Amino acid sequence: MGTFFEMGGYAAYVWPAYGLATLVVVGLLVLSVRRLRSAERMLTLLEQARRERVDDGPDA
Amino acid sequence: MTILSAEKIACQRAGRLVFRDVSLRLDAGGAIVVVGRNGAGKSSLLRLLAGLLKPLMGSVRTEPSPDDQRRMFGYVGHHDAVKPTLTALENLVFWAGLADRREARARAELALEAFDISQLADLPGRILSAGQKRRLSLGRLLVAPARIWLLDEPSVALDREGVRRLEGEIGRHQASGGGVVVATHQDLTIAGAETLDLEAHRPGQRTAGG
Amino acid sequence: MHRFANPARFMRLSARLLPWLAGATALLLAVGLYLALIASPPDYQQGQAVRIMYVHVPSAWLSMAVYGAMALASIAYLVWKHPLAGLFTKAVAPVGAGFTALCLVTGSLWGEPMWGTWWVWDARLTSVLILFFLYLGYIALVGAFDDAERGLRVGAVLVLVGTVNLPIIKFSVDWWNTLHQPASVGRLDGPTMDTAMLIPLLVMALAFTLLFAVLALVRTRAELTWRKVEVLRLFQAAGE
Amino acid sequence: MRALWHLIRRDLTLVLRSGTDAGAALAFFVVTVTLFPFGIGPEPEILGRVAAGLIWVSALLATLLSMERLFQADYEDGTLDQLLLAGVSAEAIAMAKIAAHWLVTGLPLLIVAPVMAALIQLPAGAYGVMIASLALGTPVLSLIGGIGAALILGARRGGALLALLVLPLFVPPLIFAVGAIDAAALGLSPRPNLLFLAGLLAAALPLAPVAAAAAIRQVLD
């Protein structure tokens, strides 16, 4: 198993490349999903606030 | 004879509905005074009529007429478009020359006289007061003749005498078959002016016609 | 394209599509990684270092494909006023920038063992570097306007200007490269490809492309939702 | 077309009267070129070898320096609205500003550049080609910079943003111009590079104002 990780002596190049690729892929996914979730949370919050404002009559 | 008509226009600014279902008709020699509180969209309406802003809904139409060579719109907004490094006369000569090269200078001097700022002719724009800059901006309407004047709070920064001259020029413009749409808080005496109140067109308003 | 025109329909369709797309992406990525790292032979010249190619080439492909998608969306947005195209372009730009950066770094990681320096002004890498600046320029420009709509429209114009200039830039960099560096030692896109290497590369390229699709849908949904939030905030301010 | 000349005359007066813009770009060019020997060392061989690149990068940055506010003043004081309402096309507005900018910034560079080139030991045979490359290249820089200036119109932070936007677009003219000078310095024919540069100019002249106009029109949301 050990030789696999040595990558024929190029471990110092192959693993950082794959590590960074994982970082970019996972990073983009996490950031994007989090951005979507926070937008949705804010939207439901504001829609709720607006419903209360409208139910209490326009002069609320 | 209608020279400008707008059908059920709505305006959106930075994602917000400013007004909706606004319709108006301006006849030759006619005038419309637009009123409404701050933020009601008076400036947006004028910019929309001038074509500087696209309506979200509805349409604006102008009736070109063969015997009137003037360009369609003359607009005076909050910004006076006065170049600080050009003199008052040079500012007007530029706009006059843009419209028509012939006697640009003479026309510019006449416009300065019409708003009583001839004495400022050789002074650079940067030292003019707000009122003087506004008179210069109004002078542009005279050097670059347009059929429809769109005036956004033109009397702001004008003294009483300035307002009187403005009203006189508006009257002369109407007599020449032109039209005027004025957004204002101060009541200007304009012959045959109809009033358009933007309050009735607020988006939140649950008006019958809404 | 017009199936997605109406935002509400886009939200419904993308909600149904996303789970499947995400599943397929995960599967393909797993298979691709296995093929790339384990089930493919080392290169007779570069040895195991060639495995970097399976990450470098797909990210190079994405860096160009995403800009191409942005160019198409910008035309749809400016010319046909497609309501979603502008938001799509803004949503995917960071993804394009991310993969362009990945391409540059993996390129130098791969180049180092071959050329002994971390950065080589190779014609292709240099063009990708300039493309990276085009991405950063777009992201900075779109964010620099108070009126979001204005930012999107001006951004679209920049993307079109960039698209027209890309071939000219590519040509001038190639010309400049031949002037200063007669023949680059190792061809960056690796040795002639035998199938044992081609398959992992294609699988990884497809996996990256699907991943882009997932990110594009998620991020466009986010932009659309933030746009609705913005409008509600303004309504709240106006007391409606 | 007549409106264009009328606009150029006014824009020229505006820039000349403001004084700062015109002089600042030239001063920046002179200062930047003068700084390089302190960084690279005064040895003639080294300096001479990179002189063409130093001249051109400094010219490029000087063009950028005075480009940021190209349309900003007209946008902020309402002149842009008035011009568009007067029926002047956005292309003419863009072309006039770019032409005025080149006359005040690009042209003077042609005159000052040989002096600065001598300062940094540009090889003797390359002076003529350098001037030719600047004559063909500086209009391209003004045209491309004009697109950037139009794009950042009304943006919050213009300066650094403009440099980021136009940097990629400046690469082709920079490559062909310096390529021409280097060729001449080595006694080779600068023709191919100069022809490419001329090609860029021929393309940028019609296309840049159209692109800048498209950006300006975004003001009318």
Image (tube, rainbow, N blue to C red):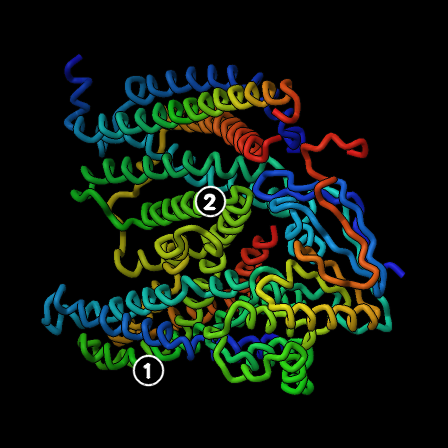
Residue C152: % across, % down: 52, 44
**Residue C142 marker:** 2
Residue C17 in view of the camera: yes
Whole-angstrom CA distance, mark 2 to mark 1, is: 38 Å
Does B168 appear above or below C145?
below
> Hey, which quadrant is residue D120 in on the image?
bottom left
Q: Is residue A44 left or right of residue A30?
A: right
Q: Amino acid at mark 1?
A: Ile
**Residue C50 marker:** none
Does C59 appear above or below C120?
above
Closest to the observer: B42 or D72? Answer: B42
Does B206 appear above or below C138?
above
Residue C9: % across, % down: 65, 24
Secondary structure at badge 1 equals helix
Check disc 1 and report the residue beneath it: D111
Residue D88: % across, % down: 64, 68
Q: Is residue B58 left or right of residue D158?
A: right
Closest to the observer: A13 or B70? Answer: B70
Does B32 appear above or below C87?
below
Callout 2: chain = C
Is the residue under label 1 in contact with that under label 2 (CB below 8 Å)? no
Q: Residue at x 78, y 71 (%)?
A: B173
The quadrant of the image that shows the N terminus of chain D is bottom right
Callout 1: chain = D
Q: Residue at x 33, y 50 (%)?
A: C123
> Hey, which quadrant is residue D83 in on the image?
bottom right
Disc 2: CA contacts within 10 A as few (<14), some (14-19) or many (>=20): many
Secondary structure at badge 2 equals helix
Closest to the observer: B24 or A36? Answer: B24
